[in-house]
Image: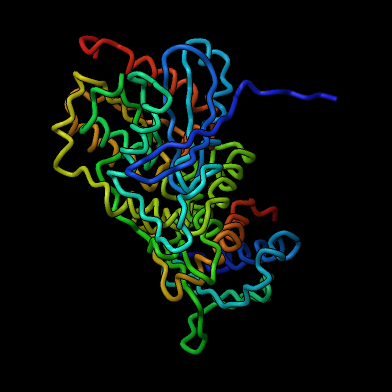
Amino acid sequence: MADTSDLIARFERMQTDLNRTPHLKRLGALFSETVLIQVDDEEFYLFFDKGQLARIEPGPSRKTPWRFALRTDADALARFWEPIPAPGFNDIFGLIKIGRGRIDGDILCLVKNLRFFKEFMDFGRVELTV
Amino acid sequence: MNAVFEPITGRYVTLDISGVTQRIYFEEAGQGTPVVCFHTAGSDNRQWRFILNDGELTRTHRFIAPDMPWHGKSLPPAGWQTQQYDLTTETYMDTVLAFCDALAVDRPIFAGCSMGGRIALQLALHHPDRFAGFIAIEASDFQPAWYDIDWFHRPDAPGGEMGAALISANIAPQSPEVEHWNTQWLFMQSGPGVVRGDLSFYTRDGSLVGQLHRIDTAKAPVHIMVGEYDLTCTPEDARRTAKAIPGATLDVMPGIGHFPMSENPERFRPHFFNALARVAEPRSDQ
């Protein structure tokens, strides 16, 4: 079961890291989309604006359109964010290949912005210093 | 000033392959047992530069690494501007054999990675007499695409950069950062439609399902290598493949992905030493 407050804290930390990383602002300059990340039954809507993460809103929401969704489970995401993830857990497409993740929606949009989105997701590997 | 020159030399050879004139760029280093080294899809011979620069290996081996037509510094054939590049098994085998003939290399060891590993197995099946042995890296009987290969040749997106971002899933997290990104850089530099055309071979044309048992390793040994982080040709795929080839040997490499010689040369090095020894052994030792 996903811990919502922990994940919100994690996404906020990732937001801070992304928004202070110049090369991702450049790579993501054309990326202004809403991404749904679903962890178990918990939904998180990430609103990207020109390569910056403008805001994060927890779901559920039936009224929020999104471009693509990454769906996984809490254990898989925790393993994805380990410093040296095990094979299959090291990449979002790895999660799909091993049956622990799913991508829905406009997959081509994701693939066009894949380096940007992967580097954003990698920020989760930085341990929280609370 | 600290200038370090490498022992690698590069040359061009123009030859006919399946009736088409091709200008091929190749690099080589070392003296001794010839080893022809073939790169992965969407990349070029620079993937092999650490092996060609390995002073210990080049004392006893002559490594020759070409860029396939359409790749690296090899040009596409005349008229490419109106063609769709689709690599086929026949053309690929013809390329390898014509290249070896042109260089008058007699029964070299063949080392190839990914699609180069697949063609190693095709050559082991169809032309075992032409080679001393096969090192088939990240090689399996068949891999269906888990993506749409047409993504990689679109007018509205850079195929090389998308391809690099996608295949980065196959680079192990243990890889040194600089070589992780260099491995992606080579992919990013592939010409328009090249990744797509290579994947056409890899995911559609080159199946060896049901044929592996016919490979005669008594004529030329087959050694299969696979990285534990390879999501495309997984260790399970390589195990299945090795098991189906009587006499084939297998090495699963920890902490390595789909581009061993490029993404983590230090970790790959002892495995490649072992591979060269394996394929050089008399068959009775295997």
Q: Position of residue B117 (x, y in %)?
A: 35, 36
Please state, as top left, top right, bottom left or bottom right, where the N terminus of chain B lies in the image.
top right
Q: Residue at x 48, y 26 (%)?
A: B64
Task: Give the left or right position of residue B264, taking residue B136 as reference.
Answer: right
Q: Residue at x 36, y 27 (%)?
A: B101
Residue closer to the observer: A73 or A25: A25
Q: Kindly tell me whether residue B253 is visible in this rendering.
A: yes
Q: Is residue A86 above or below residue B158?
A: above
Q: Position of residue B171 (x, y in %)?
A: 50, 43
Task: Give the left or right position of residue A55, taking residue B285 as reference.
Answer: right
Q: Residue at x 51, y 60 (%)?
A: B159
Q: Quadrant of residue B39?
A: top left
Q: Quadrant of residue B249?
A: top left
Please state, as top left, top right, bottom left or bottom right, where the C terminus of chain B lies in the image.
top left
Q: Position of residue B164 (x, y in %)?
A: 53, 53
Residue closer to the observer: B36 or B181: B36
Q: According to the image, what is the colour scheme of the structure?
A: rainbow
Q: Position of residue B253 (x, y in %)?
A: 41, 30
Q: Quadrant of residue A120?
A: bottom right
Residue closer to the observer: B62 or A109: B62
Residue closer to the observer: A68 or B61: B61
